Amino acid sequence: DFRIFCGDLGNDVTDELLTRYFSHFSSFVKAKVVRDKRTNKSKGYGFISFSDPQDYIRAMKEMNGKYVGSRPIKLRKSMWKDRNLDVVQKKQREKQLLGLK
């Protein structure tokens, strides 16, 4: 999929709010706000996924600088594909051992 890094998110922004702002793009897949594991507070950034590159490009142009919640958001191309495959596979094995997905 095509993933956008979404920065400068306020503490009031949730997965549902991001979804509401980006779901009008037809190939929208998912929105996720990254949270601190202990406190569950937002870390101030998240990711938005699209299945179509055209929607990805449109969203980058149309939504960058728009207010989502109390602040304007900053959008950039996500570097998620640059992750190390060994790390991803290790995390998947750990999840399976813990009985998660």
Image: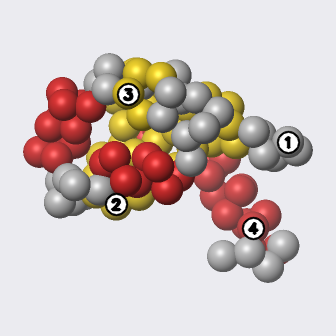
Q: Which residue occupies 88% across, 44% down?
A: 38
Residue 29, numbered label: 2
> Of callouts 2 and 1, which one flags the residue occurring earlier in the amino acid sequence?
2
> Of helix, strand and loop, which one carries label 1?
loop
Q: Are marks 4 and 2 in contact (CB under 8 Å)?
A: no
> Of callouts 4 and 3, which one flags the residue occurring earlier in the amino acid sequence?
3
> Of callouts 1 and 4, which one flags the residue occurring earlier in the amino acid sequence?
1
Q: Are marks 2 and 3 in contact (CB under 8 Å)?
A: no
Task: Please name the residue that numbered disc 1 is placed on.
Answer: 39
Task: Please name the residue that numbered disc 3 is placed on.
Answer: 67
> Of helix, strand and loop, which one carries label 3?
strand
Pick the quarter of the image with the N terminus.
Answer: bottom left
Label 3 sits on what residue type?
Tyr
Q: Are marks 1 and 4 in contact (CB under 8 Å)?
A: no
- Image quadrant in which you'd find residue 56: top left
Q: Are marks 3 and 1 in contact (CB under 8 Å)?
A: no
